[in-house]
Amino acid sequence: MKNFGFKELTVYKKSFELAMKIFEVSKSFPKEETYSLTDQIRRSSRSVSTSIAEAYRKRIYPAHFVSKTSDADMENSETQVWLDFAKECNYITAEIKDNLDKEAAEIGRLLNHMINYPEKYTSG
């Protein structure tokens, strides 16, 4: 892997950007959702980026790298489910949901490439 930090990875940049978009859109969720939907969607979307950072630091151990990258993929999928709930509860429009979902799907494809071809990302 090239000698640069995790913040240079396209998947990290995209996941961080998505988490910030979700943070902004979730500010308008009702107060009664504070400890459920709002907290959950923010947590899962942020966990994608943090898991990528952890995977990057474990890249000398291919199996651990794949495990942490898989965790990021799992959190990304969870975020997509929370987006479904937000749309069905009429907290976001179908257009916003579709746009955020497309970004999450792209992140998922990038993560799956990392999982399926760890040798391109690891140094072990």
Image: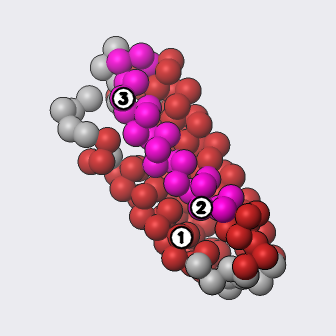
Q: Please tell me which of labels 2 and 1 falls first in the chain.
A: 1
Residue at 40% from the left image edge and 39% from the top image edge = 53
Nearest to the observer: residue 25 or residue 106: 25
Q: Distance between the residues labelled 3 and 1?
A: 26 Å
For the residue carrying disc 3, how many other residues have a C-alpha within 10 Å: few (<14), some (14-19), or many (20+)? some
N-term mark: 3 or 2: 2
Rounded to the nearest whole Å, what is the CA distance between mark 3 and mark 2?
23 Å
Residue located at (73% from left, 81% from top): 30
Question: Which residue is the site of mark 1?
Answer: 23
112 displayed left or right of 124: right
Task: Magenta stretch: give its range.
Answer: 39-62
Q: Is residue 108 above or below residue 35?
A: above
Q: Quadrant of residue 87?
A: bottom right
Residue at disc 3, secondary structure = helix
Q: Mark 2 points at which residue?
A: 42
Evaluate if marks 2 and 1 touch, with contact meaning CB atoms under 8 Å apart.
yes
At label 1, which amino acid type do we have?
Answer: Phe
Q: Position of residue 27 (x, y in %)?
A: 59, 79
Q: Is residue 59 visible?
A: yes
Q: How crowded is mark 2: few (under 14 residues within 10 Å), some or many (20 or more)?
A: some
- Residue 110 placement (x, y as % from top left): 47, 46
